[in-house]
Amino acid sequence: MRFLLVEDNENLAEAVSTRLGMDGHAIDTAGSLADAWEYLDYSSYDIVLLDLTLPDGDGRRFLAQCRAQGNDVPVIAVTAQSDVSSRVEVLDAGADDYISKPVNFSELEARCRAVLRRRGGSSHNVQRFADLEFDTLRAELRFGNEARELRNREMRLLEIFFSGPDRIFSKVQIGDRLFTSSEEISDNVIEVYVARLRKKIEGSGAQIETVRGLGYRLSERG
Amino acid sequence: MVRKPYAAPSAGSIHRRMVLSHLALGALASLCLFLAIRFVAFQTAEATQDNLLRAAANAIGEQISSSGEEVIVKLPHSAFAILETPSQDRIFYNVRLNGVSITGYEDFLPPEETSRLREPFAFAASYRGFDLRAVVLNTSAPVGSEQQAVSILVAQTQYAQGEVADRFAAWAILISAGIFLGFAVLGVLATSSALRPLHRVTEAVARRGPNDLRPLKHPTPVELTPLTSALNEFIRRLRHSLRRTETFIAEAAHHIRTPLSTVQTETEIALRNSPDDATRKVLRKILFSVEESARSASQLLAYATVTQRSDSTPLERVDLRAKVQEAYDALYPTADLKDIDIQLQTEGEGFDIQGDVLMIEISLRNLIDNAIKYSPPDTTISLHLSSDGDQHCLTVRDQGRGLGQGDPQKLLDRFQRGSDTAGIVGTGMGLAIVNEVARSHGGQLSLKNNKEGGACANLCFPNFP
């Protein structure tokens, strides 16, 4: 996904953009509302992540102005305020959703997906490998005449494999992306999810191979 | 929401004190008046009787004549007619010539010191057991060529006089009672008129909405000005401190969360880039602590917000069902991340309650968030909203580890966590917040373990028709 991050704290902006980049997203960072306007004029984004307190103004006003100008880019507000009244204001001003700091990136991704899904989605969310068609917004998998729904973690696991077909992903890499960092996980858990996903793609032209000692790989059935 | 007015301990009632002092004053005044009337009445009756006795004595005196050596005393009929009363008063008399009784009661004598008085003299006397009013008249009669001293003593019992005095006294009582009544009415009127401005100030303060912290501009009498000034100063300080608290809460959240975000994100990046197991373990611990701090910060601030707002926010009509739906929508992605399914079921309709929207939202989110937190992946949380007409209840059932041993209601206290919560980020504030909100809205939160495992929380708010 292509993000515009509007955040004035440089350290945080840099960290967030690195972190999102790790999951394969493209990020532009604007340190002020003025910068944000410029970015919005020249590029289009899947999601704008908008901090609410910026040096040159209030994010809510920016949002309202944006909507008034007919720009309906999906916006997720990133608030440091916990109280629900500011959240409600944000939604009223035209944000699609909000998430509070510190950002849980899995949750952020889930919310982005939910926002895009609500807005009707677009075809570029369908990815293909072998005869698999994977719609990441609907968490749907199609091959041949089959259509299968994926649960959240199955979908995210499949997303990891889709991000590098034929690449080997270690259990550690998978665990890092599949679970919230503070969750306790065991190797066994990943085996469980891999097994479930294998069941879901059973009968297709793709398979998840176990590469002994190294990890797993999505490959075409030979 | 239920708010009982706080009453300071009563130091008696001004109204009662003022009315009572008016009554006391009235009683004193009417007693004085009664005594005065009675005294005057008595004096008047006595003076009248004295005059009659004098007239009688004079009438006797005028009829004394002498022929040669003889003194003739004729008791005139008119003298006794004057003294006649309807009360059957008794009359005593004694006429003496040179100290020797000529006619009448011989042993009935005037006091010695009156013998030289030339004018008729009235005095109180006692004779044969009767209390009498008496008049003595010293005169003279010619006997031969000499003037001889004649003393005429006439006395009468005081029955008629007493009756007159009694009649007057009855009137006096009637008049006094009237005066007393007048004072009482005047007291009540004066008191309520004096206290009316005070009531007006009270009403003006009581009528205010919780957010109305403007100074009192009601015109008040001079005597109340110190009170209203003090009140206004207090309102000013309160407004100031409320605003400071609100700003502080927002600022604190911002200043805690932003750096925490950086730490968390950088740590996640380091975790991804680190293949070394020992380092990864440490990084995970850091992330766990960061999440815990962030959560504590939110919960403490939410708790502060909730307790601060419970006394200062206007209440409005809130559709509980819509709020539950919103909370469900907001938290669905969070649950989905853990492959937890949330099911919302509503039974009946009309879920209006009265309260503070923000607090109700906070409580619903906390309750559902809590269930998600303690639920293992691939389980179901069921939300069941129902109503029995009097109150609307949201029941949240999860398939987690349950509430452990011990009294589940204890978990409602601040910083109390269940016995079995190691490894799960938590502050022990979540349910305390929900409980605080429920309590301040006249509802309640109860917790129990499900028979088939997991926890069950029941949050109820009273119906607002």
Image (spheres, coloured by chain):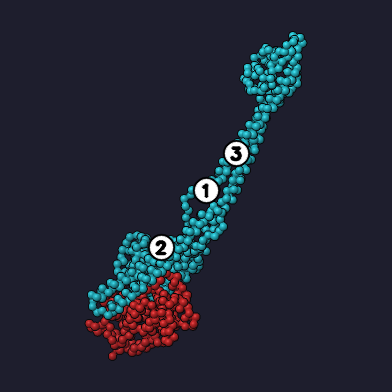
Chain colours: A red, B cyan
State the mark number for residue B29.
3
State the mark number for residue B435.
2
Quarter of the image where one finds residue B258:
bottom left
* Element under disc 1: loop
- Of badges 3 and 2, nearer the viewer stands 3
What chain letter is assigned to the residue under label 1?
Answer: B
Dots 1 and 3 on the same chain? yes
Residue that numbered label 1 is attached to: B13
State the mark number for residue B132.
none
Q: Are marks 2 and 1 in contact (CB under 8 Å)?
A: no
Instruction: Give percent across and percent down for residue B423.
Output: 30, 69
Query: Which residue is at 59% across, 48% downward?
Result: B190
Q: Quadrant of the C terminus of chain A?
A: bottom left
Whether residue B32 is visible:
yes
Instruction: Give percent across and percent down for residue A179.
Output: 32, 76
Q: Are marks 1 and 3 in contact (CB under 8 Å)?
A: no
What chain letter is assigned to the residue under label 2?
Answer: B
Q: Nearer the viewer, residue A3 or B32?
A: B32
Dots 2 and 1 on the same chain? yes
Q: Earlier in the sequence, mark 2 or mark 1?
A: 1
Q: Nearer the viewer, residue B445 or B4?
A: B4
For the residues labelled 3 and 2, the Cα–Cα distance comes to 63 Å
Residue type at mark 1 is: Ser
Query: Which residue is at 55% across, 48% downward?
Result: B15
